[in-house]
Amino acid sequence: MSTSIEGMQPTSDSQFQAAAGDGVPPLERVRDGLFSYGLRQPGTLPHFTLSYLLLDDRGGVHLIDTGWDTDENWAALGEALGALKHALSDVTSVTVTHLHPDHLGMAARIRAATGAPVALHRIEQDGIDELSAPLADEEVLTRLAGWGVPEDRRAELLQAAHLRSRWPSFTADRLLEDGELLDIPGRAVRAIHTPGHTAGHLAFVDDEREVVFLGDLLLPNQFPGIGLGGTPDGDPIDHYLASLAVVSELDAFEALPGHGYRFTGIAQRSAETASHHENRTSEVAALRHPSSTVWDVAAQLTWTAGWSNLSGLPLLSALSQTSLHEERAARRL
């Protein structure tokens, strides 16, 4: 992943500093009745997820994204609620931007403890059902061979594929569609279907407070991966670019992302992110030749960690991203 902050302005010093180091940002007020705090993301980058707490006009607390399901994060949720003079029993709904475990992770534990319903997009539920099904080794190995992965790296990537597919079965209580309002008394927060990162990714807009909850659609300090959840219907890169165009129309709003830090400058960051992917497709097209494989092309691309340092899940993701750009480049011929 590449990084850049050009054309943006951070709106949270504590989150900006935490993203630049190894800390986790504390609970902080975003607007009246709207707060954010960081939750540790174990063993991966980025190293924390941002969760948002919205207070309704009846004394209820509503969560957008929950963080990884760890005892540390469970304790952090309790501390955040306590600082706001609320208890776990006050949580009355959980809404999730997408199915990844750093966003959906604690939803099941919160629901079990509080009875609060969990909402996500209908397509994301399909993705969970697909990913929680058993994974066939032969299917994965055939794909790896087709990508040109050296034989001595295939066992490593097969194991990574099993890790990525080791999805707990989960059934949401409410399946959202584009344009629907969340069930938050006194607040009009609407869902926007923003596919690309995953097929059922959602963003949420609070027009009155001029904020947009972005999940992993648009991040201030890295370019999100694409096509990372369930089988997409169509080209996830094209879907992603279309989603960026949608949120670009909210340039006057403050961006509340799933990682990094709050910021302004949605349109410029969206344009920069779209340009990154257009350039990556062109770069892949220039490297393609009849005998090249996905592995050959990926090895010549620039990766934040460095190609030689990629292994396991990050390597599998890099190959998947390269394959998507190869397919897109081929369709343009």
Image (cartoon, rainbow, N blue to C red):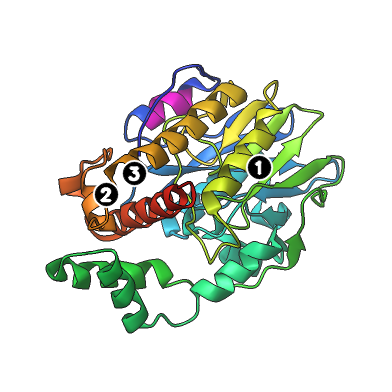
Q: Quadrant of residue 125?
A: bottom right
Q: Report if residue 15 lies within the magenta region.
A: yes
Q: Amino acid at mark 2?
A: Ala
Position of 169 relative to 118 (above/below) = below
Q: Nearer the viewer, mark 3 or mark 1?
A: 3
Give the residue number, with chain letter if any, for mark 3: 284
Q: Amino acid at mark 3?
A: Val
Q: Which mark is residue 298?
A: 2
Q: Which mark is residue 315?
A: none
Q: Earlier in the sequence, mark 3 or mark 1?
A: 1
Along the horizontal axis of the image, is 307 left or right of 196?
Answer: left
Which residues, given as a range, are shown in magenta? 14-19
Image coordinates of residue 182 in percent, x first then y, are: 79, 50
Front residue of 23 and 89 = 23
Along the horizontal axis of the image, is 239 left or right of 40?
Answer: right
Evaluate whether residue 193 shows in this view. Answer: yes
Q: Earlier in the sequence, mark 3 or mark 2?
A: 3
Position of 203 relative to 150 (above/below) = above
Q: Nearer the viewer, mark 2 or mark 1?
A: 2
Along the horizontal axis of the image, is 54 left or right of 124?
Answer: right
Element under disc 2: helix
Task: State the CA–CA distance, disc 2 to disc 1.
Answer: 40 Å
Front residue of 240 and 79 = 240
Evaluate whether residue 82 shows in this view. Answer: no
Give the residue number, with chain letter if any, for mark 1: 53
Q: Report if residue 308 lies within the magenta region.
A: no
